[in-house]
Structures are given as structure tokens and as C-alpha cells.
Image (cartoon, rainbow, N blue to C red):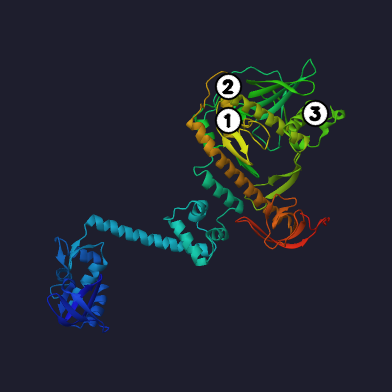
């Protein structure tokens, strides 16, 4: 006799060698012998032999119509597999038919539910339809994935993938068909997904790659402002009797600081430092405040920026030439020797006479009084000369050391994602008279206003530096780097949330009102906690994008060699480009040594610059061919 039985979930057959009530000793067609418990025995049969039975059953299995088999079980609650075989194949069903039936039942859990030894139950019609639909859907999905994989490997990006390349790379839904296709294609092509998408033309540009990654990580809900946002009305304020002017880069559109200077009868002056005053109308926890709180700062990068406040708000409060916007003004009375004798803070409207640009002022025509009235000079030149003298006096009082460092300006000509886009990088030495004037007067205002809050023992968003570490603090403290007893940011409220918060405190202070952010304010403490990390993250992104555009510049100009100066060990600072990085094969050189480096490889996807050491050229002038 032979035995059909279940062994570890599989249907098998073999010849019975011996048996008892509890178990049977069975020899399988391959000769292996196993012990089969009586509970797993399904069918005893004399012929054919076990091997022929299983071969025939497999053949019959392919002929079974599962829908018809399911219909054959209608009208029964539970049934045995042999009974169903006779219902389907007829009363004379052979052992092959019976074995084929249990194989079908075992392989089709969506049609039949197992209820015990050799017993099954027909699946409900609704459940079966749902299961069949799921199988059909999975088959369609598999076919779709296979089609997309073939397209990607062929160097073509299906629109369903190219339209969502950023999400697939930076914030993927790993259960989506597009992601599964991308991963499968990248694995088959032995290529990183980002390079596969780039090869297939799905990524507009490497610039878009970095920008979209930043947006996905930092602004997951997007950077668009609500279309229906309302700009609060500017309060009715007195008009200041000044002619104010601002000093900014040519690309600056959020102009939030300006100056004025009046000559007094005693030979002294009245200095006005005027700061845009959005806090006069943007209330805490208003819709606009929540927007600014979520962003905390304007994000800057070459050729673009993401503003903290909507343009509709900026345009109302920006200190634009020819307007009279609201401003928080710090007035300082100066004697003839430019000593500060008193200060006063007022909220008012300020007539903006001019928006001066740093590029034009760097030419220093205003420094020479003989140029006054010349077409290329500003009518505010006499005031600028006095303000520069005052700034130099303030810097000296703080013990400020003149630092001749170089800044870099980036201009992106054309669309950043266009192939014909060009980048222009120009140098600008810091420490110029204009830089000194602007920076020292801003420090003066921020120190004066920090002192106002500190005197009242009011909290704010103070900048505190101790042991070289700078942090935001809700309590006033010394800033060792600036050598001042207390310091805050209050001069850029259109661009930094810290300044907006501090301006609210200052407005309350000058009007004898209660502070919007009292001690222990959870809103203030939350902003303090979030600001440093967010502001640092924005700065890191700006630095990364400046590095990216430096690489584009090197490619654009066909530069093959670069010069740099050693900082320490193998860390170098490049000449004429704002890049500081390590050179792996740099031999030991003394700090300050100039070295020549070959451009070995540029990776715009990372981004990365790989260089190779050529030579050290201490105290030597390099030929233009080796300079960048």
C-alpha cells in the first residue's frame, strides 16, 4: 500500500513499509524513509505507485479550473478533499484526481480555507472577489514596474518617475511602484538611483538636485506663502524730520536699516539709526507671526533666497527710497568730538531719501570733500564722512582690530537650472570704510537696545559669547568677541525672527507697556531654542551652494590648476575662491606656504572637488596660467 500524507505543509506520497495505530514507516520515491504520524495521513491507495501518483497529480493539477472547483463546493459548510474530488471529477475519481484536488486546495488559500486534517471550507464570495482583485492588481503592478525598469535602464525616464524625481530621491514612499522600479533599475544597472535618474534625463540639473533636497528637508510643506494673506494696517505715526538713507548690496530687497545725520547748533550732531518696524503691526501669534516663527530667518544662496516674510509685507515695511515707512529709530546726540551724550528711541515714519549701494560707495569718492556735488558722488557724502569718523571712534572704544578678510559675491547669470547658466564670482575686501560705518553703527544700536531691555530686566533674544562660544539666550549677558556688556539682534526684523521678537519688546519698553514676552514666556523660550539650529542650518546650506557654484565656475572657465595657501597640515584655503578643504596628498608644508594644485575631478552631485598636489611655490608670483 501507498500513503498520501502532509509533511511540514507539503503534500507527499510514499510506500508503506510498516504501520501502527500511531504512525507509519514510509519510503519516499527517492528512497528516503520517514515516519509519518497518523494525524498527517490523508489517503491510502494501492495503485499507482507513489512516484506515478504525484507525477499524474501534478499533471491533473494544471487542468483544474479553480473557479469551477470553488463552485463545486457550493452548498457545503466543510468538506473533505476526497469528497470534493468526486464532486468535481465524478464518482469514479482516481487517486490521481484526489491527490490533484488536495494539491489545488493546498495551493489556493484564497479559494478555500483549511479547517483540519484534509478538511476545507469554501471562501465567501466577497472575500474571494477581493483576493482575486488583489492578485490581478499585483500582476498589473509587477508588469508596470518591469516596464519602468526597462525604460530607465534604456536611459529614458517615464513621466510617472521624472515628474516625481525629487520625492523619489529625498522623501520616497518606499511602497510606491515608482520607487520600487527605481530601486530595481538602479540595482540592475549597478548605479546609484540619483545617477540613474540623471542619465535618464529626469533631474533638471545638479543645482535643482541640491535645492530640492534642502527644500524637502527644511520646508516639507513648500515655500509658497498663503495667497490670501492679509497685510496688517500700518499704525498712524508721526513723520520724522530727517532725510534718511540706507547702505546695502545691489541685490538687497529687504532694506531694514537706514541712517540720518543732522547738525546741531552747538556744533554737535544728532545721529538717527532707523530700523524697519514690522512689529508695529505684526502681532504675536498672528498668521504672519506664525509664518515668520516657522522660518525664523530669510535663507540666502547664490542667485536666490527664501524670504522669512511675504513680499507683500516686505514691500510695505522695507525702507525703500521715496517712501515713508514705519521705523523704530534710535537717536543719539553727539557732541562736536562725536562723543555720545544721550540716546532716545521713537516709533515713527521716516522719509527715505536714498538707497545707497555698497558697490558705488566702495569707490570712496565720498571720502574726499572736493568731490561733493560731483555727478558720481552722493549728496549724503558729508554725512557719510562724519558717520565714518564716529564708526572708527566706536570701533576703537571696543578695541576692535581691523581684519582684512575677503568676501565673495556670486552673480548667477540666467536660470540656475539652465545649461547655459553662468556664474560670476567677484572679490570684495572687508574692513573698508563703508563696512566699518555700517557694522559699527549696527553694533551701536544693538548694544544700546540690549541695554534698554537689560536695565528693565526684560527677557529677549540676546547674543551671548563666552569662551569663544556664541549662543542665543533669553537673558542679557556679555559678548566677549565684540567686547560689549550685552548685545542682541534688532536691526533686521524683516529678515530674522530674533530681531522681530526683540523689536516687540523694545516697542513695549518705549511705550511703558507690559512686555509681550515676560520672563518664563514659553513662546520666547521656544524661539530661543529653535533659532540657533535653524540659523546655522541655513548658513550651512548657503555655504554648500557657494561651494557648488565655485565648482561650476571652475568647469565654466576651464581651470586646470588652482593655487592655495596652507592653513595647517593638509588644510588649505584657495586663492580667489571661497573654498577651504583638505588635500590628501599634500606633503608637510609650513603654514602660509602657497601651493599649486591640479584639478583632478569635480563632482557636482555630492558636491566635491578632488585635487592633486603639484608643487609648493613659497614667496613666488605665479603666472596667470596657474592663477584662477
- Extreme residue toward the front, this view: 467
Q: Secondary structure at mark 1?
A: helix
Residue on which the image places disc 3: 385
Residue on which the image places disc 1: 500
Q: Residues within 10 Å of mark 2 (few under 14, many from 20)?
A: some
The residues tagged by marks 2 and 1 sit, at their Cα atoms, a distance apart of 14 Å
Which numbered dot is residue 509?
Answer: 2
* On-image quarter of the C terminus: bottom right
Asked which quadrant contains residue 57, the reply is bottom left
Asked which quadrant contains residue 482, the reply is top right
- Extreme residue toward the right, this view: 370
What residue is shown at x 57% (from left), y 44% (from top)?
Answer: 537
Q: Secondary structure at mark 2?
A: helix
| Residue 324 in view, yes or no | no
* On-image quarter of the N terminus: bottom left
The percent coordinates of residue 12 (x first, y second) are: 24, 76
Q: Residues within 10 Å of mark 3 (few under 14, many from 20)?
A: some
The residues tagged by marks 1 and 3 sit, at their Cα atoms, a distance apart of 31 Å
In the image, residue 509 sits, relative to residue 204, either above or below, namely: above
Q: Is 249 on the left-hand or right-hand side of 207?
A: right
Q: Secondary structure at mark 3?
A: helix
Of the image marks 2 and 3, the number of the one nearer the N terminus: 3
Amino acid at each position: 500500500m501507498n500513503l498520501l500524507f502532509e509533511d511540514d505543509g507539503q503534500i507527499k506520497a510514499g510506500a508503506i513499509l510498516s504501520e501502527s495505530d500511531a504512525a507509519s514507516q514510509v519510503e519516499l520515491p527517492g528512497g528516503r524513509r520517514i515516519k509519518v504520524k497518523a494525524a498527517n495521513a490523508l489517503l491510502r491507495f494501492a495503485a499507482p505507485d507513489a512516484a506515478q501518483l504525484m507525477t499524474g497529480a501534478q499533471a491533473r493539477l494544471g487542468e483544474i479550473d479553480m473557479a469551477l472547483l470553488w463552485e463545486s463546493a457550493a452548498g457545503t459548510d466543510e468538506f473533505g478533499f476526497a469528497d470534493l474530488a468526486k464532486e468535481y471529477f465524478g464518482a469514479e475519481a482516481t487517486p490521481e484526481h484526489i491527490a490533484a484536488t488536495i494539491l489545488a486546495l493546498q495551493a489556493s488559500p484564497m479559494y478555500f480555507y483549511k479547517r483540519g486534517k484534509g478538511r476545507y471550507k469554501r471562501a465567501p464570495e466577497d472575500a474571494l472577489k477581493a483576493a482575486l482583485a488583489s492578485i490581478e492588481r499585483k500582476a498589473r503592478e509587477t508588469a508596470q514596474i518591469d516596464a519602468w525598469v526597462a525604460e530607465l535602464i534604456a536611459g529614458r525616464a517615464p513621466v510617472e518617475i521624472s515628474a516625481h524625481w525629487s520625492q523619489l530621491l529625498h522623501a520616497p514612499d518606499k511602497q510606491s511602484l515608482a520607487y520600487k522600479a527605481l530601486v530595481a533599475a538602479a540595482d540592475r544597472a549597478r548605479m546609484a538611483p540619483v545617477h540613474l535618474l540623471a542619465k535618464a534625463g529626469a533631474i533638471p540639473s545638479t543645482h535643482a538636485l541640491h535645492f530640492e533636497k534642502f527644500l524637502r528637508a527644511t520646508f516639507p510643506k513648500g515655500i509658497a506663502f498663503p495667497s490670501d494673506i492679509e497685510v496688517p494696517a500700518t499704525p498712524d505715526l508721526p513723520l520724522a524730520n530727517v532725510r534718511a538713507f540706507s547702505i546695502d548690496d545691489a541685490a538687497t530687497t529687504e532694506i531694514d536699516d537706514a541712517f540720518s545725520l543732522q547738525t546741531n547748533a552747538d556744533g554737535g550732531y544728532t545721529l538717527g539709526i532707523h530700523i524697519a518696524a514690522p512689529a508695529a503691526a505684526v502681532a504675536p501669534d498672528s498668521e504672519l507671526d506664525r509664518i515668520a516663527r516657522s522660518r525664523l530667518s530669510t535663507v540666502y544662496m547664490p542667485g536666490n533666497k527664501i524670504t522669512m516674510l511675504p513680499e507683500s509685507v516686505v514691500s510695505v515695511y522695507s525702507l525703500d527710497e521715496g517712501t515713508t515707512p514705519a521705523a523704530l529709530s534710535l537717536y543719539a546726540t553727539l557732541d562736536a568730538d562725536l562723543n555720545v551724550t544721550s540716546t532716545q528711541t521713537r516709533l515713527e515714519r521716516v522719509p527715505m531719501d536714498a538707497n545707497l549701494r555698497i558697490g558705488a560707495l566702495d569707490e570712496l569718492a565720498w571720502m574726499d570733500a572736493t568731490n561733493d556735488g560731483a555727478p558720481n558722488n552722493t549728496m549724503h557724502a558729508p554725512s557719510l564722512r562724519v558717520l565714518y569718523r564716529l564708526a572708527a571712534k566706536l570701533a576703537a572704544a571696543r578695541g576692535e582690530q581691523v581684519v582684512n578678510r575677503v568676501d565673495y559675491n556670486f552673480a548667477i547669470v540666467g536660470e540656475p537650472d539652465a545649461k547655459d547658466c553662468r556664474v560670476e564670482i567677484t572679490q570684495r575686501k572687508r574692513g573698508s570704510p563703508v563696512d566699518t560705518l555700517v557694522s559699527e553703527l549696527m553694533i551701536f544700536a544693538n548694544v544700546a537696545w540690549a541695554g534698554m531691555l537689560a536695565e528693565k530686566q526684560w527677557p529677549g533674544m540676546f547674543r551671548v559669547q563666552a569662551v569663544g562660544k556664541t549662543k542665543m539666550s533669553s537673558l542679557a549677558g556679555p559678548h566677549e568677541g565684540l567686547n560689549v556688556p550685552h548685545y542682541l539682534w534688532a536691526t533686521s526684523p524683516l529678515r530674522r525672527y530674533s530681531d522681530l521678537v526683540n523689536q516687540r519688546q523694545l516697542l513695549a519698553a518705549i511705550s511703558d507697556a507690559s512686555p509681550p514676552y515676560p520672563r518664563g514666556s514659553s513662546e520666547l523660550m521656544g524661539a530661543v531654542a529653535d533659532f540657533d539650529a535653524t540659523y546655522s542650518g541655513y548658513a550651512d546650506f548657503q555655504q554648500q551652494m557657494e561651494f557648488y557654484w565655485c565648482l561650476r565656475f571652475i568647469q565654466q572657465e576651464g581651470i586646470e590648476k588652482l593655487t592655495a595657501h596652507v592653513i595647517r597640515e593638509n588644510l588649505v584655503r584657495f586663492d580667489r575662491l571661497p573654498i577651504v578643504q583638505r588635500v590628501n596628498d599634500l606633503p608637510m608644508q609650513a603654514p602660509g606656504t602657497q601651493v599649486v594644485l591640479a584639478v583632478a575631478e569635480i563632482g557636482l552631485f555630492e558636491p566635491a572637488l578632488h585635487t592633486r598636489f603639484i608643487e609648493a611655490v613659497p614667496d613666488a608670483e605665479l603666472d596667470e596660467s596657474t592663477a584662477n
